[in-house]
Image (cartoon, rainbow, N blue to C red):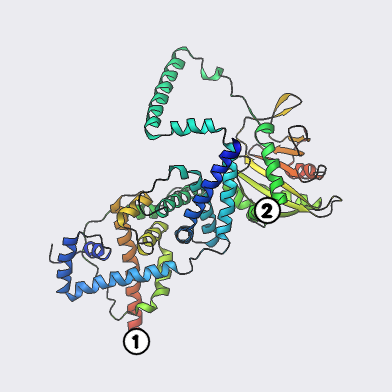
Amino acid sequence: MRRSIAGDLAVERERFEKLALEHLAAVYRLAMQLARHPDGASDLVQETYVKALRVSEGFMEQGGGMRPWLFKILQNVFYTSLAKSKRAPVSVDELHAAVADDPRPDEPAHAWDLEGLDWEHVDERLKSAVEQLRPEYRSVLLLWGVEGFKYREIAQIQEIPIGTVMSRLHRARSILADQLADLAEETGHKQG
Amino acid sequence: MSETPTARMIMLLCDGELAPREAEALQRLLESDPCQRSRLELQRGLRRRVAAVLQTGCEPPPGLADRVRRSLAETQHQIESTEESPRGSLVWSWLRGPQRANVFYVAASLTLVAGAVLVGIFGRPIDQWRRPAPLNLVSEAVPYVADEHIRCAGSAPSRLEKAKFKSPEKAASKLSDWLSAPVRVVGMTENLRQTGWEFLGGGYCGVPVAERSAHLLYTRQDLPQGPAMLSIFIVPDDGGYSVKRWGREVPLEPGALIELLPGPNLGREVTIYSDGVLVYFMVACYSGALDGVPNAIEDALKAPRR
């Protein structure tokens, strides 16, 4: 009898492993955006898969396969470990930043002057700007830009209101566009 | 639709989040306004480049998939060992069914409320309550650490996986964070080196307490029986631990060092020490290989011998 349980679990685990590891690259990408270091990201990925296996009985397919579910677990693992390690009170800056996450009313489109910007050569500046963003902005950017999730799906994965997804995306893109505007201006000056 | 589209509308159009009719209207508006159209192009260009930047250099390292597979196998092993019986799991899965679980929660809540009322009326004051029975480390933890030690000693991949922090300083720092208490790896290493043991590494561990254990590994080459490995498992001391010796429950007191010799229920000699915050379990490959280790640790931690 014991052998049969172990056998079932082994089969379940193999099936889980096969389905879940298909998304390893995507899970690692998100882990890198959160942990920002290959070692930390690998630890995060490992812990995510172990957690996922432990709760795999509760997995229900809601469209999109296992990927959104794994992302959700990864987010939870990351923020739980962050909460454990970060016992210091929240700084005033962080509070202000948190307030800035609130959905914003419609505002007029920014008038960035990016004319003449060579898109093929902006990656370095963009990379550095992305690295300076807070993890929650980077993860929203990744889910939106690379993984191609809709706002509703991102909201479900991150367990935040859809308005917060929109405001984070808007804010992150504004910051990046500002950086590119600076670059365009610098390039313009050099050329001029 | 207003005559001047907002940043939000352009963002929604770029992201395909507008309803078809709204998207069409906005597209028409943008066609007649080159300035606004350039903003849409900017958003699209930004999205393409952000996607490219976020993917660059984010490929998983070559060994990660295998590492995850090993962890999953280890987790499965742990799940199997904690699985009580098929009947138990059926009952549990029945209780966890969505509707039955609700009934169960309501019943449990009512029982708790009734219990609290009865205790309030008939119960004794809290200071007269007996403490719960202590957790017996010999039956609850020691066999597991002995098994885990044997597993790591016999498997190079398991050893490498466990000994992920190669320097004592990094191990001390990482494992202290993990256990939320100061792990004394460095002092032990220095002392153990004098007895011939070299620090191999340390890492997170699920034994003996799931998700709250650390494992330090040491190796020694000069024993007559051949190369040997020493494991030190560390768990938080939540209090209430005891050790059963000669039929008596002996409480695990902070600062006391307890040596358990191999017997019918214990295949390896295990030494236990608690500094009041963390409990250390020491296991070696050969009986007798631990010679000098408890003394070294005792010196390091200034523990009185029991």
User: Mark 1–mark 2 contact, CB under 8 Å?
Assistant: no
Quadrant including the N terminus of chain B: bottom left
Residue B61 to residue A52: above or below: below
Going 38% across and 51% down the picture, which residue do you hit?
Answer: A158
- Give me the disc on residue B159: 2
Residue found at x 51% / y 14%: B124
Mark 1 belongs to which amino acid? Gln
Amino acid type, label 2: Arg
Q: Residues within 10 Å of mark 1 (few under 14, many from 20)?
A: few
Foreground of the two, A19 or A40: A19
Q: Label 1 belongs to which residue?
A: A191
Q: Which of the chains bears the disc numbered 2?
A: B
Please state if B163 lies on the left or on the right of B22 as rendered: right
Looking at the image, residue B10 lies above or below residue B178: below
Secondary structure at numbered mark 1? helix
Instruction: Give x and y (percent) for residue B191.
Output: 77, 49
- Mark 2 residue crowding within 10 angstroms, few (<14) / some (14–19) / many (20+): some
Q: Same subunit under labels 1 and 2?
A: no
A57 shown above or below B29:
above
Residue A1 % position (x, y)? 59, 35
Q: Please tell me which residue is depicted at 44% across the width and 15% down the height of the picture.
A: B118
Q: CA distance from mark 1 to mark 2?
A: 59 Å
Chain at tag 1: A
Quadrant in the rendering for residue B121: top left
Question: Residue B16 in the image: x percent, y percent?
Answer: 26, 62
Q: Quadrant of residue A109?
A: bottom left
Q: Answer left or right for B281 relative to A129.
A: right
